Amino acid sequence: MKRKLPFLFALLAVLVSHSQVSDFKHINFNIADNVAKLNEGASLKNLPVLAHELTYKLSTDVEKFRAIYYWVSHNVIGDARQEAKVNKSQRTFKNDSLGFVNWNHEYKRTAFKKLMKHKKTVCTGYAYLIKELCFLANIECEIVDGYGRNVNANVEALETINHSWNAVKLNGKWYLCDATWSSGYFLGSLFVKDYNDGYFLTDPQLFSKNHFPAHKKWLLDNPLSEKEFVSSPLIYSEAFKYKLIPNNPNEMNIETKKNDEVLFSFTTLDSLSNNKISLVKYIGTKEIPYKIYNIEETQGITTFRCKFDQKGFYDTHLKINNDIVATYTVKVTK
């Protein structure tokens, strides 16, 4: 398994990347959040009024956008029926991307009607509402269509375009965000409201771990190939909560020899010194931890080492506290 050069390149990429939301660390977003909370439950029937109520008390565009984003993420919920219908169509048009684009264009009308009436939607509706409210607040914002990567989609190859998010221009610079995945998640057909702030103005390097745009300009300052996207470790929403970027191994599929040392490394915006780091596998429902050692944290980069002492093929999960943040598949040979 290649180790040294990919690790050095990953570290270099981290050092030159920009932590997006930290550009505004001088701003207290609690003020914008409170404005959004004061408008909880507001109707979507008059978007100009809603945009005004969310922004007129705020002086900067980033605060106005924060209020819009926070409100949408907390007041719109995912629609399981629409999600299932869209997923079915994605499978139908798996080998016909143009056909899916045409179908999706027609379906948007139905989706938007349900959004405006019931505040229930899929990713396109979230992105559309963010863009419309930004337009009314005189903030430049775009809908970005592309590939969302999770355990069910785009794991080892790009399939059908299946997700939409937003790019917003603030102080002359583009930022990325995803109100859909900020708002919560599905547990079966039940939508669980669980706000995740990690998708707000996310560092492009982290964002691209599970978002790949149809138009590569929306990768911003993070050049990434399709192959790199689908071969990287699978990460989950909890990684965004910790603002965690896996560096090494830089691929999901790892091959190593029994008892050889494997170096793991990841970057976080905030220190994890008070958090438990572990590497685990599951046999049935039983969690089995691996022995990890030489855990070090320097300038936001955490490293540790592990030896796999049993031959086989294992789904291996990186955990922070009780949260699984990334998954690797490890093939251990003699």
Image (cartoon, rainbow, N blue to C red):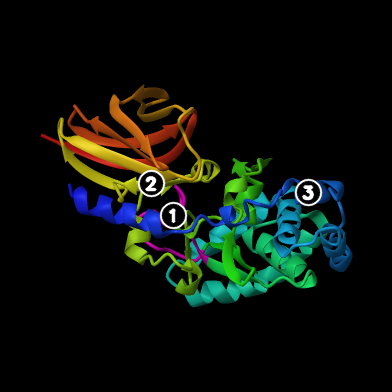
Magenta residues: mostly which secondary structure? loop
* Labels 1, 3: front one: 3
Q: Is residue 155 magenta?
A: yes
**N-terminal of the two: label 3 or label 2?**
3
Work out how far the residue at label 2 is from the one at label 1, CA to CA, in angstroms. Answer: 9 Å
Q: Which residue is mark 2?
A: 246
Q: Amino acid at mark 2?
A: Pro
Q: Residue at x 48, y 37 (%)?
A: 271
SS assignment at label 2: strand
* Labels 2, 1: front one: 2
Picture coordinates of residue 163 (x, y %)?
A: 55, 61
Q: Which residue is mark 1?
A: 209
Q: Is residue 207 left or right of residue 263?
A: right
Picture coordinates of residue 233 (x, y %)?
A: 36, 48
SS assignment at label 3: helix
> Do the numbered discs 1 and 3 sit on residues whose CB atoms are within 8 Å?
no
Work out how far the residue at label 1 is from the one at label 3, CA to CA, in angstroms. Answer: 30 Å
Quadrant hosting residue 164: bottom right
Q: Is residue 43 left or right of residue 237?
A: right
**N-terminal of the two: label 1 or label 3?**
3
Q: Is residue 161 left or right of residue 194?
A: left
Q: Is residue 172 above or below residue 82?
A: below
> Do the numbered discs 2 and 1 sit on residues whose CB atoms are within 8 Å?
yes
Q: Amino acid at mark 1?
A: Lys
Q: Which residue is mark 3?
A: 31
Answer few, some or many: residues within 10 Å of disc 1's Cα (few below 14, many 20 plus, some between 14 and 19).
many
Residue range highlighted in magenta: 146-161
